[in-house]
Image (cartoon, rainbow, N blue to C red):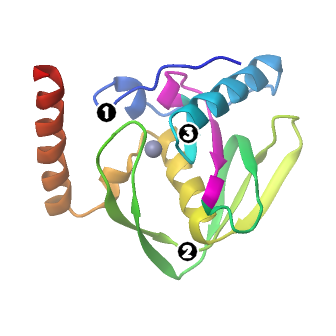
Amino acid sequence: MALRGIRILGDPVLREPAEEVEAVDDDVRGLVGDMLETMYHADGIGLAAPQVGVSRRVIVVDLGNSDEDGVGTVALVNPRVVEAGRQKDKAPEGCLSIPGLEEVVERPDTVTVEGLTPEGEPFSREVSGLLSRALQHEIDHLDGILFIDRVSPFKRRMLMKKWQKSRAEEVAS
Ligand code: ZN
């Protein structure tokens, strides 16, 4: 396993729809291992392959200290939301690719996610709460969608102002 660099907002790979994985092979399992190491190192609870510059449909989630149900590590290949409940949930989200920014995002509380495990076995689970939110956030990444796209235009403008200011300070320091 190896650490990979995390791509930051502005990198075009974050906006590209990622490619379907044709075969779950050692290459994919190696990518999953690297993504987990990178996510843990960055103290994140989820990561999608485009965030490490790989435009393939692979995600990892581990809720860490917030993992109340003992779910542990979830790694999925070609994941998709096949069903979403009508009830919505609002909670703050951040993203390793947009460090320092956080905003409340509304999403369906319960979704059914399907995909393949890194062993190539079919995965299907109805999830809710934080796990549901994390999986939806990561699956969004595979379609080039970021959490800042899911807030009101007004809030997005505020976030972008804050982002440009923090980037400018980073360059200056
Ligand atoms: Zn993210």
Res 105 quadrant in image: bottom left
* Mark 1 within 8 Å of ligand 1, using the beta carbon: no
> Is label 3's Cβ within 8 Å of ligand 1?
yes
User: Who's the residue at 52% across and 82% down the image?
Assistant: 87
Distance between the alpha carbons at the discs numbered 2 and 3: 20 Å
Decide whether residue 54 is among the magenta residues: yes
Q: Residues within 10 Å of mark 1 (few under 14, many from 20)?
A: some
* Residue on which disc 1 sits: 9
Tag 1's secondary structure? loop
Q: Earlier in the sequence, mark 2 or mark 1?
A: 1
Position in image of residue 65 (x %, y %): 62, 58
Region in magenta: 50-65
Q: Are marks 2 and 1 in contact (CB under 8 Å)?
A: no
At label 1, the amino acid type is Leu
Task: Please provide percent x and percent y for residue 45.
Answer: 57, 48
Q: Earlier in the sequence, mark 2 or mark 3?
A: 3
Dot 3: few (<14), some (14–19), or many (≥20) neighbours within 10 Å?
many
Which comes before the other along the chain, label 1 or label 3? 1
Q: Secondary structure at mark 3?
A: strand
Q: Is residue 167 magenta?
A: no
- Give the residue pinned by disc 3: 47
Circle 3: residue type: Leu
Above or below 32: residue 157: below
Q: Are marks 2 and 3 in contact (CB under 8 Å)?
A: no
What residue would you read off at disc 2?
109
Name the residue type under label 2.
Asp
Q: Name the spot of residue 75 as percent of width and height, x first.
A: 72, 42
Determine whether the beta carbon of the residue marked 2 sits less than 8 angstroms from the nearest atom of ligand 1: no
Q: Secondary structure at mark 2?
A: loop
Q: Residues within 10 Å of mark 2 (few under 14, many from 20)?
A: many
- Left or right, 115 with respect to 120, comes to left
Q: Nearer the viewer, residue 45 or 135?
A: 45
